[in-house]
Image (cartoon, grey):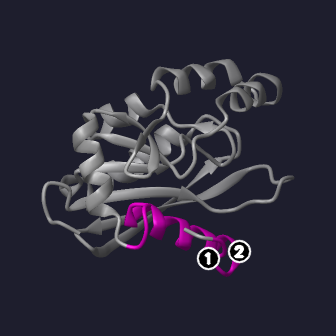
Amino acid sequence: MNQAPFSHLIGFDDAPFSRGHRGDVLTVGAVYAGARLDGVLSTRVRRDGANATRRLAELVAGSRFHRQLHAVLLQGIALAGFNVVDVPRLADALALPVLVVARHEPDMAAVRRALMERVPGGARKWRLIERLGPMEPMAGLHVQRWGIDAPTAERLLRVSAINGKLPEPLRTAHLIAGGVGRGESRHRA
């Protein structure tokens, strides 16, 4: 991974949980300095809740890594089901750009339907998603971004992808969260 300008990144993903699970879900952040895993952070967010933004902001701001970070990467805009991250608020709280990354473009009509029909506070959560605009195809992925222009975001994605298309901080967070959550990581990261 190229050392500049994005040599310090954190990527977040949540641990797997059963369909019937209620309560908090483990969320893992993998901190990278260049191509090296530099640290791991973790917190818990409420299944389908509204505390993901606050928990991530407090976790990162209170860590020894915050001052070195150049950007935050999220594996999807929601953690623990539909605990939707308020990306502009997270970016402002940390004074960092935030990228929401997905391998495939989500079916936004299905997401909206699920939020409106099955999730408490669904209308507010849908507005948070809409505020970011549609996902953009970029570097073989789909991205929503805040606080960073498209060419810079694409460069960040390309230099941080070491083992495939997914940025290494997200790939590592996914593997760690899966391994801790299930006892063994599964599926492609």
- How many other residues sit within 10 Å of disc 2, few (<14), some (14-19) or many (≥20)? few
Residue at which label 1 appears: 179
Residue at which label 2 appears: 182
Above or below 58: residue 113: above
Kindly identify which numbered label has been placed on residue 15. Answer: none
- How many other residues sit within 10 Å of disc 1, few (<14), some (14-19) or many (≥20)? some
Contact between marks 2 and 1 (CB within 8 A): the answer is yes
* Image side of residue 123 versus residue 65, left or right: right
Type of amino acid under label 2: Arg
In which quadrant will I find the C terminus? Answer: bottom right
In-front residue for pair 33/160: 160
Q: Quadrant of residue 136?
A: top left
Q: Position of residue 17 (x, y in %)?
A: 74, 60
Q: Residue furthest right?
A: 20
* Image side of residue 165 versus residue 130, left or right: left
In-front residue for pair 108/32: 108
Is residue 61 one of those drawn in magenta? no
Which residue shows up at 67% across the image and 39% down it? 82
Which secondary structure dominates the residues rendered in magenta? helix
Which residue shows up at 47% across the image and 21% down it? 131
Which residue shows up at 63% across the image and 62% down it? 15
Is residue 136 visible in the rendered structure shown here? Answer: yes
Is residue 95 visible in the rendered structure shown here? Answer: no
Type of amino acid under label 1: Gly
Q: Position of residue 182 (x, y in %)?
A: 71, 74
* Image side of residue 112 versus residue 141, left or right: right
Is residue 173 one of those drawn in magenta? yes
In which quadrant will I find the N terminus? Answer: bottom left
Above or below 128: residue 145: below
Q: Which residues are magenta?
A: 163-187
Label 1: which secondary element: helix
